[in-house]
Image: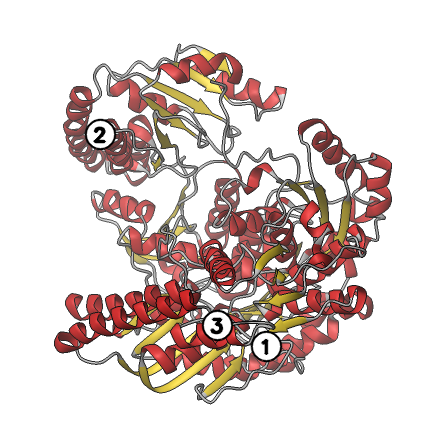
Amino acid sequence: MPIKTKRFINKKRSCSCSMPGVWRAVGYSKGAVVIFHSPKACAHVSHTMDINAHFRGIARGEREPYGYSTPLISTMLTEKHSIFGGAKQLEKCLDFVVQKYKPQYIVIANSCVVGVIGDDVAAIAATAEEKFNLPIITLPCYGFLDGEYYAGYYGTADALVDRFLSGGLPRDKNSVILLGDNGGPNAEYAVEVKSLLAYFGLHVIGQFPGYVAYNDMNKVTTAALSIVLGGRGQANDSLVKIAKKLEEKFAIPFYGEPYPLGWQGTKEWLINLGAKLHKEAAAKKAIDEQKERLDAILSVAREKLRDKKIVICIGRQIEYFRPEWLMEILQLSEIVPLGVILLDSYTTKDRAHMEEAIKNCTNMDVFNQVEGAKIVDAADIILTTHEIENYNARQLFLPMLPTVGVTGMIKLINNIIKIACRHGNKEGIVYG
Amino acid sequence: MAKVEQWGNICNCVNTCALTGAAAFFAGIPGAEIINNGPLWCYFYALRYLEHAKPDIGKFYHGTQPDNNAVIYGTEKFLLEELELRKKAATSSIMLIENSCSVSLIGDDIAGIARKANMPWPVVCFDSGGLLGNFCQGYSLVGVKCLQELKPTKKIPKKNKRINILGMSLGYFNDDNDLAEIKRLLTLAGYEIGACIGDGASVEEIMNLSSAEFNLVMHEELGLEIAKFLEVEYGMPYVSSGIPYGLEGTVNWLKSLPGYIPQNEIAIEVEKYRDKLFAATNEMRLVWGELWYDSIVVSGPSTMAVSLAEALRREWVDTGKLTVILQDIPINKHTSTEIDALLLTAENMEEVEKVLSSFASGLLMGSSSETVVLQRNKHAENTQICNISYPIADELLITDEPFMGLRGAAHMLQRLWNGKITMKVCR
């Protein structure tokens, strides 16, 4: 049967919108108000993201830290503003926001509509800042024009550093400021990193930018170390720039090594952190204890997944999916997959990048989507970046942002075991 | 119509854009293809919204993904590329090309581009971004536009007791089950179902819509403008009597239909449900007490919220205060003696914020959006929640039970009782 994938979107050009990135950068920062200079519905997109994130957090037992989110106001541009401009509307909206919410600062995100009609938002923000004696931040990003999600996120974080971090406070010894989001302070990434930092006697004083209240903003400069909760690609590059800026301005050293993904990644992350802090013994202890946790789950995996025919389907670009961590988990679990199928989503160049990455970490056979159909037919379990339609084989969705550390490996292995233990012909994908 | 729209925290209201509404109308036409001429982000959110009701929508809904330069040089290149793909890949009954807001401003001649592509099926072009308005505006305006382009046949003999249904959409929660119940009731009442425009009618059925005696408008915010257009252009009368919720509500709704003659079969069914519901709830009252709430908030699309609130108070529960929040701007002003406070998110944003932030206990009938507000205010634990509209992230509804009609009356009462019992048990 030919392989068909669900919701298979071939990213050709623009991808995301800068406005949700702006909002997320201050999404839980008390004292902030975000204005979307946009049609009303653009704010609904961000609001929907927030609703989904809220319930994902509840589902994982990750309560939001403050039971709070930053007010989000839209200037509610309509057709008439596309003719006469939206400047007056933004000015009136700023008046309203200042009066009603009494914010400590305002961030304005611009929509693509504003990019087309050409409102001088920077000038309006500067005038309003003077009028209200209130910090008002805006960025030269306009919806999907001139930068995407991370441009909005990074630009806002960068502006917060410039505007609100002045230093002059005593250093908090052994303290860490986390940089980035990944679901916030109670989500898997931050929780795992905090538990690893405990081996080194480090404690976290906050997560910048999205989770620091205005009143606590300058306390960021008291950190003895900043750690990037990045990942790879755009997100990591942007956050490393923020980390470097904190180092330059406030002499806060940063640790921006690739995140602790997979066992090799976790080990390297711990070793390098130990070297940076001159706490090699702590790193060794952490590695030994984490290894014990990993060995325990691997012995279960080897027993439960023995003889299972597993196939891997990949359709994501290399910047959104690195195959190394998955191949490592399979190798440690002593699983030899039937092969890797590259789905029909790649340009020739993107496909070559992914093939090269796969060949660098495994000698598995790589097939195209047509060749792969027979292999998928023979599989018990499909580990896939895209849901495959009309297959009874059990499918596990490979996450865009895998959980870090040994905890992340345990989670993925447990999910594969659960799917392998499924009885009957239950369809539906399991989210890894 | 609304006065000047009030600003406020958008997280207290729901506002899906016209782009999604327009796509929803066409998603309700079998065989239709939809091209979203706008950024991937806008396309993806409309897609995800519609996927709730139509999981395979991705096969018929595509995006052109114009780049930065498109705002200067236009989207022709991207649109033509997508149209060529569609010509090769699909056989369509009709196609919608919908522009996002920024693309709408560029001034591309979309219809001209479509002509150039020489598409083998009818193409409707529509500027439908958020600048135009929200979901219902996108839906109703594209509905009219679709009829203007298709030009349904006028010279068809009228069929006695044949009716078209307007203003139902898969973009509304539980729509498929509600539509099935409406059709069942109308058939029992002796009517013949004509075209369900925007929710199942094929292009052929739309072309023959004038054979119906009258048009029945369900959700006014979706269907009324279409009904008015058909009245003016086709001389077709319409009726709009709200939505049938509850047993009495359904009976009254049927009575309001032109040419309705009471049917024995319906009377028997009403009596059956009345006895069943009375017996079952009486038993529950013995243990759990009355279905009483100090305060109730109903929030949703306007026709649904008002009609549901009326049935709620008349037939299902008692309350000290019933507040209704309308997420769109109703075309006709709603008044009801059952409702204590009627608020529009567009005009009474400040009051809406106050109602939600101070709502500490009672019954909330709305969406996950209001639930999040309550949870963040730490008030959700004392509030019974019953979802009635999108967005929904905290409930799965997969059976075929409607909210509307006689079957819906039983279903809603069951949900309300079980919600109350679950709250008490979990406390």
Residue A181 visible in rendering: yes
Tags 1 and 3 touching, CB below 8 Å:
no
Q: Mark 2 points at which residue?
A: A423
Position of A27 relative to A311 (above/below): below
Secondary structure of the residue carrying numbered label 2: loop
From the viewer's perspective, is A431 left or right of B178? left
Tags 2 and 1 touching, CB below 8 Å:
no
Q: Which amino acid does label 2 sit on?
A: His
Pick the front one: B183 or B243 = B183
Q: Residue A190 carries which label?
A: none
- Residue A265, quarter of the rendered image: top left
Q: Please name the residue shown 73% across and 76% down the image.
A: A88
Q: Where is residue B134 in the image (x, y as percent from the top left)?
A: 62, 64
Furthest-front residue in this view: B264
Classed neighbour count for the residue bearing mark 2: other residues with Cα under 10 Å, few (<14), some (14–19), many (≥20): few
Quarter of the image where the C terminus of chain A is located = top left
Q: Which mark is residue B262?
A: 3
Q: Which of marks 2 and 1 is in front?
A: 2
Q: Residue B346 carries which label?
A: 1
Secondary structure of the residue carrying numbered label 3: loop
Q: What residue type is labelled 3?
A: Pro
Q: Where is residue A32 in the image (x, y as percent from the top left)?
A: 49, 70
Q: What residue type is labelled 1?
A: Ala
Cα separation, mark 2 vs mark 3, equals 52 Å
Position of A91 relative to A72 (above/below): below
